[in-house]
Image: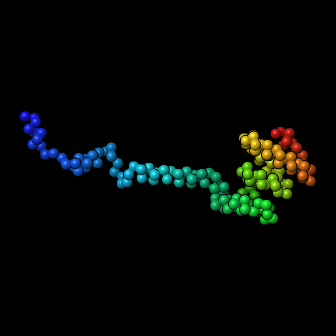
Amino acid sequence: MGRREDDDREKLSWREIDNLRNRSRHVSRDSGSYRERTLKTDWARKQHLREAEKFFQGKKGSEAYKKARAALDEKYGTSEFPGALSLFIQEFGIPDDWGLLLLVLDTANPDWIRRALAVMKEMAPKRSLLEQKGFKGKVRVIASATKDRSLREECEKILETL
């Protein structure tokens, strides 16, 4: 008799079955596919990380820093470079970027060179072997080419420690 009772019961259509599944607490109510939601959350996470990086970088995360840095790259090797570097150092201080410090070493200002050498001396052990050799060579050139006796002595001290 159990079989007969099952036949008398009204069967659910596929639409009704799907609707029952959609009411489940295990099914998301958000519109869009899982992939779309994932892409949105990944984008938002990356956006928040970018904003956090800018915050912790301080002035270096600003547009003004990026423009000043780009101006230095553009004006390197021209007569406008020392002026652009002067403005950069006044606003942002001596850089802590290895590549930019190398550009500072090419200037004629002994004070900037001293400050750049001090920063690079601290960074050198963490740099690659090739960069360390390049730094030593640069310091040797500065020591032999400068007319500033104290700068020459400072270069010789750095060479001894490296």
33 vs 89, left or right, is left
Vertical placement of 157 versus 36: above or below?
above
In the displayed orientation, state which residue is furthest to the bottom: 80
Which image quadrant is residue 7 in?
top left
Residue 64 falls left or right of residue 139: left
Instruction: Pick the residue in front: 87 or 11.
Output: 11
Question: What is the x, y in percent for residue 39?
Answer: 46, 52
Q: Where on the picture, by quarter, is residue 68?
A: bottom right
Nearer the observer, 150 or 35? 35
Q: Which residue lies furthest to the front in this view?
A: 130
Residue 47, compared with residue 133, is above or below; it is: below
Camera sees residue 83: no
Judging depth in this view, the residue of 150 and 139 nearest the camera is 139
**Residue at horizontal 19 percent and vertical 48 percent from the top:** 13
* Residue 140 is at least partly visible in this image: yes
Q: Residue at x 12, y 39 (%)?
A: 6
The residue lying at 76 percent from left, 60 percent from top is 76
Q: Looking at the picture, how far across and down is residue 159, in whole percent?
A: 85, 42
Q: Is residue 56 toward the left or the right of residue 132 in the image?
A: left
Image quarter where the C terminus lies is: top right
Q: Which residue lies furthest to the top in this view?
A: 1
**Residue at 22% in and 48% down:** 14
Task: Identify the colour scheme used.
Answer: rainbow
Q: How many numbered badges does the structure rendering display?
A: 0
Q: Quadrant of the N terminus?
A: top left
